[in-house]
Image: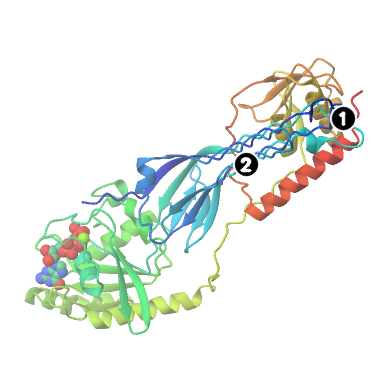
Amino acid sequence: MTTFVDRVELHVAAGNGGHGCASVHREKFKPLGGPDGGNGGRGGDVILVVDQSVTTLLDYHHSPHRKATNGKPGEGGNRSGKDGQDLVLPVPDGTVVLDKQGNVLADLVGQGTTYVAAEGGRGGLGNAALASARRKAPGFALLGVPGQAGEVVLELKTVADVALVGYPSAGKSSLISVLSAAKPKIADYPFTTLVPNLGVVTAGSTVYTVADVPGLIPGASQGRGLGLEFLRHVERCSVLVHVLDTATLESDRDPVSDLDVIEEELRQYGGLEDRPRIVVLNKVDIPDGQDLADMIRPDLEARGYRVFEVSAVAHKGLRELSFALAEIVAEARAARPVEEATRIVIRPKAVDDAGFTVRQDEEGLFRVRGEKPERWVRQTDFNNDEAVGYLADRLARLGVEEELMKAGAHAGDGVAIGPEDNAVVFDWEPTVMAGAEMLGRRGEDHRFEAPRPAAQRRRDREAERDEALKEYEGFDPF
Ligand SMILES: Nc1nc2c(ncn2[C@@H]2O[C@H](COP(=O)(O)OP(=O)(O)OP(=O)(O)O)[C@@H](O)[C@H]2O)c(=O)[nH]1
Ligand SMILES: [Mg+2]
């Protein structure tokens, strides 16, 4: 049996940015030349892309840790470090990306749909890029920023137009096998189907997909049988088909009460109320089955169901059924907004990069949060006074010092920049922040909510460089 994996926890790590280089041009018998330290390369992204030839998440089940490569450090002689390589991970159509709390980050439907799961860190500027008219020879460079890293959960929700639901052995897989070219396993014992089967049906000019779901029994919502776990595969369907067994040998069952039981389980699962339903009375090749079908048909129709009598084994009533399904699917498609023909890139939320916040926590520590201050801190080589001075100047320019003052901070008070578990803590010295100490681990950055498309990231990187240069122009630590 092939293994079917429809939920995995994936650990992704983007590449770190390479460090910028601080170097001074040297030549024999010549005075020292200008700064010639190159920039670090950016870290590679981890990118999920829908590939319709991929049908399971099995690969990620086997190797759930994926890392893009780091950017290379800049070098002397104005040599930039190479960018890290993006890691492109193909995922099946219909993959849903969630965070560990179960919040949906992206729903990847359609060939080529892309999601940046972890963004590579920026490379640090080298001292050549940091040089200016005022600072002819900066003795420092910026560090590369660690890439984003963390867990995402991938869930596969099959993209099928029609979903077959019903008791075990009602004949769901048999129906798929005669409506389409798919050859699912069929047998006379319950729970033959352990994972959804998918078949492609052509009826006239309409092509649609049909999926079955492992059989449901009373109490499935409480985990009886195989439970409702697999119903997520029918969430995207346009129409639900109740496959009812007219020839069951179990004395306490009949098609109508079977229908009630399945409906109750669907209700417990929730979210499928709006889907149109039709009823298929299967196994009418058996005389008793045909008699029962004749008997209950009016009852079902009175409830508003369209009823189809079929036999998967005798190939009876299949044409009517497949054309009726095609009609419902076509209607549902027409009612849906036109899908973009081109590949869809999941647009991230705008990054809040303008602001920052300052607050004093219970221990009296002043906590600074904000995209820029946090990044700047990561770019700073705290062993280099000039680099620390540059950071202090950037923070002062953004207004962080002023806000600290307003919040009541005094020289010598503790200031922490960054998230609780990964902050850099200083003893605050207004305008000169020295004695910095890295606390927490690097590279654990949970900002999955804000990946940016490649073009935007490139623009941001360029803006960052300009901004750094602008700041640097007006900066005189002495
Ligand atoms: N006589 C008759 N038997 C049928 C018909 N359709 C299916 N069966 C038989 O019913 C049994 C169950 O069929 P499956 O297609 O495996 O049923 P299922 O609904 O997929 O069952 P699970 O996968 O266990 O949920 C098999 O022995 C089939 O041969 C039919 O139209 N007539
Ligand atoms: Mg089956």
Q: Where is residue 270, by image quadrant?
A: bottom left
Q: CA distance from mark 2 to mark 1?
A: 39 Å
Looking at the image, which is closer to me, 191 or 147?
A: 147
Q: Is residue 3 visible?
A: yes
Percent from the top left, x then y, of residue 297?
22, 78
Using the image, determine if residue 365 lies above or below residue 48. above
Cβ atoms at labels 2 and 1 below 8 Å apart? no
Q: Say how many tags the image has.
A: 2
Percent from the top left, x then y, of residue 165?
28, 63
Percent from the top left, x then y, of residue 29?
83, 25
Of labels 2 and 1, earlier in sequence is: 2
Q: Is residue 267 visible?
A: no
Q: Secondary structure at mark 2?
A: loop
Task: Report whether 286 appears left or right of 72.
Answer: left
Q: Where is residue 344, by image quadrant?
A: bottom right
- Quick one: which residue is furthest to the front in this view? 29
Residue at (40% x, 68% y) in the render: 275
Looking at the image, which is closer to me, 13 or 369?
A: 13
Q: Where is residue 319, by image quadrant?
A: bottom left
Q: Which residue is mark 2?
A: 82
Q: Amino acid at mark 2?
A: Lys
Badge 2 crowding class, 10 Å Cα cut-off, few under 14, some 14 to 19, many 20 or more, is: some
Mark nearer the viewer, 2 or 1:
2
Percent from the top left, x then y, of residue 96?
46, 53
Residue at (19% x, 54% y) in the render: 191
